[in-house]
Image: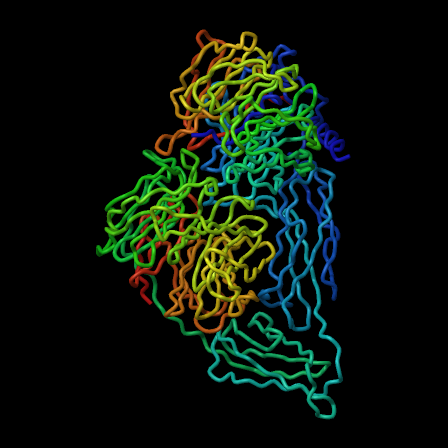
């Protein structure tokens, strides 16, 4: 049926468009209509807006009433917001399908909308937007309004808020309690309390009364239950964060190749190379560059290792600095794999050997070294790809000892710490494996899944685990505005999204956290590196809490956007400095002046 | 060591060309300047995640079309195919989430991208009606296990059938007469014949009486071409430096020696000349299919020939050469109607060009 329709559609378009021909004349294949505007798709949602009330799911329709096909049509949900307030961490609108491959003229597709809401969301009105995007253009948008009605309960006579808000500052999470009494003055057990903030955008409050202020000055917090309410007013002072900027110390310039990830150890830095650069004398990513970073200013190139690859996407160095592993993609022999390096002389890496296997032939994108094991990310979207754990106790004879694939999408990155492996698994979300932590009896040779968290529409690209704080910081390098997601993993079996950092016009790439000082360094492709205060409990939209400290696009030599719109790949805090690999300009050494 | 997954729309192009030839047209009539809807050569470049459009007459680069939404990932555009009516072209993305994208000519506007939910996506071929595309997944990570072939309905890019066919399926091409889809099982040393579009297995046969073990091929059949009358199947045996010829039932007809490590092959619209990209020695072989003899061999001056497409008249071949990590890839045009056949032009493409397809001129 659809194929038949396609022929019709094509004929219509052909009549006003193009047909295959090879003659020199211009005789039309079909009568040409009057010249008109260029064919264009016209996408609409039906209905044009959705009021869910207390429902949490609905089917809608998207149609193309224009005269040109469009696709892929991405259905992108915005943040769920309280009425007039900010995003609600952990709340999301799922759309199925999330992508329509192509929408031909006259075609429609049904879309299922499903809301996922955190427990204990306060009563009130909420909204979320849905956009139909083709490329960077939004061709249709839809507003979804829903309400949360607290469950009924016994009559309430009085509500009283209590909590210590003395010395409260913007960005601190304050736990308020509420005492609810019935008309007789007796306590009400498990009361359904709704919280709201006045003015609405001044902060964020959870259903259990945890509040974080976005603004300074006076904020009112209202708790309501069955018609009774209490209001308190709290004054919030500005958050005091370290002040100062980044001083640019130097740049190890790389111009013939694009740069990729990097690692610093001791007084040596290693940078990978990526893709093929179309400049005079340009070359492919077949090299690992070795830098002396003991010098006072510009990192000094002292050596390189050339391998069979066109992308050396990642380099990692063991904790003792004696072993390095670089990854291969697009190798000429199509075997890819990894190369292991003896770093006994860190400035003169010696190749121990290249390890290739059919498992690794699609390409190895990222690597992590933890003890006697290397965790490799193999390109691909099948069980034949994903995570490979390598026993590297004898680096001259590595052995694959375990594998894991998340069941859908693809693994992009891996980070291992305290016996937990954090798998950035794109559409499938963040997956936590026990590889020796003990929580699930896993080991490097027998990884066991602990949990996973999928955030609708969020493509998990990278993760940083901060065990003392119990947070994982996630990045999505595709979607704009860029958003770092912060997941509470204090209970690794129940990861919960609690906070975000948003930045218009730039996508986050890799991160590093100075855990001693509670400062996060975030690389944003189009914007360099940014420092944020991460002290204390994290909740809500961190960029609205006065936590921003400083950022740098390097401020030297044109910085970030020399010949592409993406650049800052990864920061690493090392010996008090921040090193940033930049795709376009090489290795940067920055000194935080805060 | 081995030719990677490849591209070409030999049969679909041949069908179009057949129509054009009947009308007395010549693919050589491509204009010297770009005009909307002019004939074009499209090249998929794996490392930069682009498709490039070239002027087939001059080799001038006319457009760069980005395929991948992930800016710093290399997702490997791989296969290219032109719809029989010339109005659309299709490209596979092999890594990340394997997809098939649909573009509209002459603007090269993307109008669709279907997720394939497969391990990979190598070549794509289109049936003569333009209704279906056949994609081979070519998952090298599990060499001994069966990989998938998919049928994609091109109207809406829905996968309507999939079949675990054999180890390392690399190329799936429909017989223009019988409608059966032949699958080159590169890591299994066999050919599987499937029904279309539902991909039910009809038969299978080894490419030699002593095939290698699954996962360890001795011959590595990578790419295929059906003769216009559907009576012969040409199979490039990558590890045997030859093209082997079978009849439509799988009976061995003959062999033709080629250059080293033959990769993609393309048949002229009249079926008389088979052109072979020899990845191992930087040449193309021109094979006389009536004599089953190599007629000539042309040095391309570039490393690792991979993809090949012929223009509508069959007088010019376009060959992608992957290059090496230290030398850029190239697109090389070969004049097939000169004596001897010779390189017409050669241009850089960036690294690892794989698929190539020739698109006819459009007219309003």
> Is any part of residue B123 visible from this angle?
yes
**Color scheme of the displayed model:** rainbow
**Looking at the image, is A435 positioned above or below residue A379?**
below
To which quarter of the image does residue B81 belong?
top right
> Which residue is farthest right?
A1
Relative to the observer, which residue lies in front, A358 or A294?
A: A358
Q: Residue sitting at 60 percent across and 11 percent down?
A: B270
Relative to the observer, which residue lies in front, A411 or B261?
A: B261
Q: Is residue A517 left or right of residue B46?
A: left
> Is any part of residue A585 visible from this angle?
no
To which quarter of the image does residue A94 belong?
bottom right
Task: Provide residue A580's location: percent of width, then percent of height.
Answer: 35, 54
Q: Is residue B123 left or right of residue A367?
A: right
Q: Is residue B317 left or right of residue B134?
A: left
**Looking at the image, is A559 positioned above or below residue B179?**
below
Task: Provide residue A346's location: percent of width, then percent of height.
Answer: 25, 51
Task: Provide residue B328's location: percent of width, then percent of height.
Answer: 39, 30
Q: How many marks?
A: 0
> Which residue is farthest front?
B210
Q: Residue sitting at 57 percent across and 53 percent down?
A: A428
Q: Quadrant of the image for the N terminus of chain A?
A: top right
Q: Quadrant of the image for the C terminus of chain A?
A: bottom left
> Which residue is farthest left?
A295
């Amino acid at each position: 049926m659809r194929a038949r329709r396609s022929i019709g559609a094509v004929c219509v378009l052909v009549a006003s468009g193009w047909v295959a021909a090879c003659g020199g004349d211009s005789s039309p294949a079909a009568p040409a209509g009057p010249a008109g505007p260029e064919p264009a798709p016209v996408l609409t949602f039906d209905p044009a807006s959705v009021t869910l009330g207390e429902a949490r799911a609905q089917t809608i329709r998207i149609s193309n009433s224009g005269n040109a096909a469009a696709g892929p049509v991405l259905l992108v949900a915005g943040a769920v917001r309280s009425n007039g307030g900010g995003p609600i961490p952990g709340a999301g609108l799922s759309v199925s399908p999330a992508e329509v491959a192509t929408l031909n003229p006259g075609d429609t597709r049904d879309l299922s909308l499903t809301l996922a809401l955190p427990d204990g969301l306060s009563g009130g009105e909420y909204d979320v937007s849905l956009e139909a995007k083709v490329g960077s253009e939004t061709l249709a948008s839809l507003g979804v309004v829903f309400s949360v009605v607290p469950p009924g309960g016994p009559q309430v006579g009085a509500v009283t808020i209590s909590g210590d808000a003395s010395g409260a500052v913007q960005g601190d999470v304050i736990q308020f309690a509420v005492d609810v009494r019935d008309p007789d003055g007796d306590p009400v057990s498990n009361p359904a309390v709704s919280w709201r903030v006045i003015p609405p955008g001044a902060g964020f409050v959870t259903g259990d009364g945890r509040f974080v202020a976005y603004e300074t000055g006076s904020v009112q917090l209202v708790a309501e239950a069955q018609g009774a309410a209490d209001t308190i007013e709290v004054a919030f002072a500005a958050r005091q964060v370290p002040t100062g900027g980044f001083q640019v110390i130097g740049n190890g310039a790389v111009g013939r190749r694009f740069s990729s990830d990097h690692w610093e150890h001791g007084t040596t830095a290693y940078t990978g190379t990526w893709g093929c650069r179309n400049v005079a004398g340009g070359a492919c990513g077949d090299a690992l560059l070795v830098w002396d970073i003991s010098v006072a200013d510009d990192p000094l190139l002292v050596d390189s290792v050339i391998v069979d690859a066109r992308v050396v996407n990642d380099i990692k160095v063991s904790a003792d600095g004696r072993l390095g592993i670089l990854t291969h993609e697009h190798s000429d022999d199509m075997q890819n794999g990894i190369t292991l390096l003896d770093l006994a002389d860190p400035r003169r890496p010696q190749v121990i050997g290249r390890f290739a296997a059919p498992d690794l032939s699609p390409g190895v994108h990222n690597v992590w070294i933890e003890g006697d094991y290397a965790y490799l990310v193999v390109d691909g979207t099948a069980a034949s790809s994903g995570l490979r754990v390598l026993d590297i106790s004898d680096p001259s004879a590595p052995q694959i000892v375990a594998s894991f694939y998340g069941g859908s999408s693809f693994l992009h990155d891996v980070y291992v710490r305290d016996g937990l492996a954090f798998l950035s698994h794109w559409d499938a979300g963040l997956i936590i494996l026990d590889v020796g932590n003990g929580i699930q009896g896993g080991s490097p040779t027998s990884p066991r899944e602990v949990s996973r968290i999928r955030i609708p529409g969020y493509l998990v690209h990278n993760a940083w685990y901060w065990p003392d704080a119990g947070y994982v910081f996630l990045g999505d390098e595709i979607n704009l505005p860029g958003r770092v997601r912060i997941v509470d993993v204090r209970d690794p079996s129940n990861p919960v999204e609690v906070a975000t950092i948003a930045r218009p016009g730039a996508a986050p790439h890799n991160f590093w956290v100075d855990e001693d000082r509670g400062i996060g360094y975030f690389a944003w492709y189009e914007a360099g590196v940014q420092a944020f205060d991460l002290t204390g409990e994290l909740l809500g939209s961190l960029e609205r809490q006065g936590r921003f400290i400083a950022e740098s696009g390097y401020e030297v030599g044109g910085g970030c956007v020399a010949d592409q719109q993406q650049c800052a790949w990864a920061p690493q805090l090392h010996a008090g400095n921040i090193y940033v690999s930049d795709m376009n300009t090489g290795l940067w050494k920055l000194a935080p002046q805060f | 060591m081995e030719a990677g997954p490849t591209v070409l729309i030999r049969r679909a192009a041949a069908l179009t060309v057949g129509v054009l030839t009947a009308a007395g047209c010549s693919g050589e009539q491509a204009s010297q300047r770009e005009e909307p809807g002019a004939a074009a050569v499209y090249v998929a470049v794996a490392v930069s995640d682009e498709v490039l459009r070239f002027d087939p007459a001059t080799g001038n680069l006319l457009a760069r079309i980005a395929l991948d939404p992930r800016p710093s990932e290399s997702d490997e555009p791989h296969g290219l195919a032109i719809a029989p009516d010339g109005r659309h072209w299709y490209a596979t993305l092999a890594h990340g989430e394997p997809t098939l994208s649909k573009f509209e000519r002459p603007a090269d506007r993307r109008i669709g991208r279907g997720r394939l939910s497969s391990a990979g996506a190598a070549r794509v071929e289109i049936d003569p009606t333009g209704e279906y595309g056949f994609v081979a997944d070519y998952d090298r990570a599990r060499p001994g296990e069966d990989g998938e072939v998919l049928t994609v309905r091109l109207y809406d890019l829905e996968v309507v059938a999939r079949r675990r066919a054999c180890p390392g399926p690399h190329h799936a091409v429909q017989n223009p007469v019988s409608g059966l889809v032949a699958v080159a099982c590169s890591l299994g040393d066999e050919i599987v014949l499937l029904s279309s579009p539902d991909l039910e297995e009809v038969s299978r046969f080894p490419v030699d009486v002593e095939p290698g073990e699954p996962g360890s091929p001795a011959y590595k059949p990578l790419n295929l071409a059906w003769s216009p009358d559907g009576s012969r199947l040409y199979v490039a045996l990558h590890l045997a430096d030859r093209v082997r010829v079978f009849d439509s039932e799988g009976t061995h007809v003959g062999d033709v020696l080629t250059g080293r490590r033959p990769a993609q092959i393309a048949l002229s619209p009249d079926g008389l000349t088979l052109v072979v990209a020899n990845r191992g020695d930087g040449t193309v072989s021109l094979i006389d299919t009536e004599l089953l003899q190599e007629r000539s061999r042309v040095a391309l001056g570039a490393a690792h020939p991979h993809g090949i497409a012929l223009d509508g008249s069959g007088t010019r071949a376009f060959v992608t050469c992957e290059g090496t990590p230290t030398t850029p890839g190239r697109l090389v045009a070969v004049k097939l109607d000169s004596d001897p056949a010779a390189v017409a032009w050669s241009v850089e493409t960036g690294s690892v060009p794989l698929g190539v397809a020739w698109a006819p001129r459009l007219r309003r």
